[in-house]
């Protein structure tokens, strides 16, 4: 069900920039195949769907809603837990696909920067709130109830199953402590209010379990 709904959303978006149905379906297949790989326990189409739903809920607050949507679709298109350049490769992948849709070069560059901003989860585009919302959508899982958060961390652990616990746990703890050291995890007032406190509780609880 989710697959057909997402495909419909993709076709509606891409069709605004191309009448080539073969191209649009080819790009969809690339998205579907990449996000459905067997190692995608969290960074999959369910994650994309969650972010797209949040974007739709906040549509009126964007400067470029469609650019944010494209950034969501492509921000994890390349994902290997053993690599540290996933975001850069995803941005390059996005550029090639958007060029094939004759998407504007300036807007394509914005999308690439939005994707790269998810690497360190720091805002790199300050002209509007588009970047802030994108990052908040991406990290909204951190501020959910503990049951949902537990499923999330179990899924992340599966994505890093190649690493034994004595390697994974210190690395994960370092990432989590880095988040706690930040002045805030979220950038928009809505998400700070809605998720910040619970996210910090969840993170501290996970650290204690490592």
Image (cartoon, helix red, strand yellow):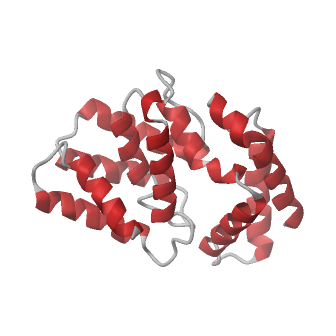
Q: Relative to 162, does residue 73 appear above or below in the rendering? A: above
Residue at the image position 69 percent from the left and 52 percent from the top: 142
Residue at 25% in and 34% down = 105
- Using the image, determine if residue 83 lies above or below residue 203: below
2 or 10, which is in the foreground?
2
Eyeballing the image, is 209 above or below 139?
below
Q: From the image, which quarter does the C terminus lie in?
A: bottom right
Task: Determine whether 93 is above or below 181 in the image.
Answer: below
- Residue 3, quarter of the rendered image: bottom left
In-front residue for pair 44/97: 44
Image-quadrant location for residue 102: top left
Q: Residue furthest right?
A: 208
Q: Looking at the image, which residue is at 48% across and 41% down?
A: 57
What residue is at 12 percent from the left and 62 percent from the top? 22
Task: Please state the total of marks drawn on the protein image.
Answer: 0
Pick out the residue farthest to the top.
127
User: Where does the image place residue 133, in percent across and percent down from the top left?
Assistant: 53, 36
Where is residue 184 drawn, in percent x and y?
73, 34
Name the quarter where the N terminus is drawn.
Answer: bottom left
Where's residue 103, x and y in %? 22, 39
Q: Residue 39: percent from the left, percent from the top?
A: 52, 75
């Amino acid at each position: 069900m989710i697959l057909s709904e997402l495909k419909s959303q993709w076709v509606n978006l891409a069709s605004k920039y191309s009448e080539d149905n073969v191209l649009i379906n080819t790009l969809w297949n690339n998205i579907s195949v990449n996000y459905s790989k067997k190692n995608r326990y969290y960074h999959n189409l369910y994650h994309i769907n969650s972010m797209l739903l949040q974007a739709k809920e906040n549509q009126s607050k964007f400067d470029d809603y469609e650019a944010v949507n494209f950034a969501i679709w492509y921000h994890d298109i390349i994902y290997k837990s053993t690599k540290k350049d996933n975001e850069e490769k995803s941005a390059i992948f996005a550029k090639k696909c958007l060029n094939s849709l004759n998407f504007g070069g300036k807007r394509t560059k914005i999308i690439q920067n939005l994707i790269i901003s998810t690497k360190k989860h720091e805002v790199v585009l300050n002209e509007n709130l588009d970047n802030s919302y994108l990052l908040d959508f991406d990290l909204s899982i951190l501020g959910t109830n503990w049951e949902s958060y537990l499923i999330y961390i179990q899924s992340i652990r599966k994505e890093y199953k190649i690493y034994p616990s004595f390697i994974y746990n210190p690395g994960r703890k370092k990432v989590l402590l880095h988040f706690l050291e930040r002045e805030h995890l979220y950038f928009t007032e809505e998400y700070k209010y809605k998720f910040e406190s619970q996210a910090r509780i969840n993170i501290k609880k996970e650290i204690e379990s490592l």
